[in-house]
Amino acid sequence: MFKQKLVFFAIFVAVASLLPATSHSKVYDQVVMENSKIEFSGVQNRKTEFTGHFKKFEVSADFNAEDLDASYINVMIELGSAESGSSKRDTKLKKGNWFDIDNTPRSYFKSESIEAISEDLYKISGDLEIKGITKPYSFKLQIRELVDLLKLSGNFTINRLDFDLGLGAWKNPDWVKHEVEVEFDITVKKQKE
């Protein structure tokens, strides 16, 4: 009986050794803030361009270029951390007509799929949530793996009215253009084991 078990074990080991090794994904969840940014830019009063950024955000990513079906990139932004170069504008952004941070303090992006376009260039599709309103979004981004770091960079455009950003008189594009550009360059460290 013992010999029989030993033979089965030997066969199992032999078969396992013939199977191709699977590459494991890496989980990244520590944003290197000094090397990261999420910026937004728009046009106010039809002529004044402005650029702002968010000081607080988190990223969780599980990425394997050889297994994109199992990969994901999720982002959470603290909307109250927005700075736009104007304290007056920053105060308005926190109010109900804009981010309404008392009721919806965070924005989320949760990926549904990641597709390779070329080396280091991918198309990501997922759900963007702002003010409790969720819309599907797809855009291109560059993903680079550097030892224990994941670098994410890209840009996309949103229509602010899709998320009830700028209600009342602010809906008029003469006050603030409807299209808002979002640009990001984020470095995330590998999760500590």
Image (cartoon, grey):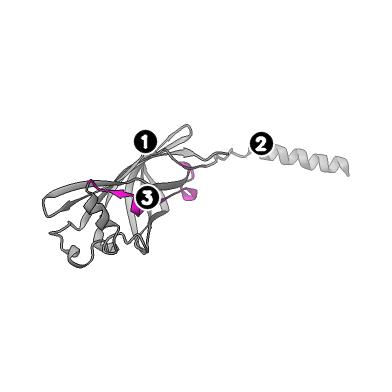
x, y percentage for residue 12? 72, 41
In the image shown, does 110 or 114 lie closer to the viewer? 110
In the image shown, does 45 or 120 lie closer to the viewer? 45
Which of the numbered marks, if any, corresponds to residue 35? 1
SS for tag 2?
helix
Q: CA distance from mark 3 to mark 1?
A: 22 Å
- 4 shown above or below 178: above
Name the kind of residue labelled 2 in the image.
Ser
Q: Quadrant of the C terminus?
A: top right
Magenta stretch encompasses residue 137: no
Magenta stretch encompasses residue 67: yes
Which of the numbered marks, if any, corresponds to residue 17? 2
Which of the numbered marks, if any, corresponds to residue 124? 3
x, y percentage for residue 9? 77, 41
SS for tag 3?
strand
- 65 shown above or below 177: above
Residue 173 sits in quarter: bottom left
x, y percentage for residue 163? 29, 62
Q: Nearer the viewer, mark 2 or mark 1?
A: 1
Residue range highlighted in magenta: 62-85
Name the kind of residue labelled 1 in the image.
Asn
Residue at the far top in the pictured view: 147
Tag 1 or tag 2, which sits nearer the N-term?
2
SS for tag 1?
helix
Q: Quadrant of the N terminus?
A: top right
Residue at the far bottom in the pictured view: 168
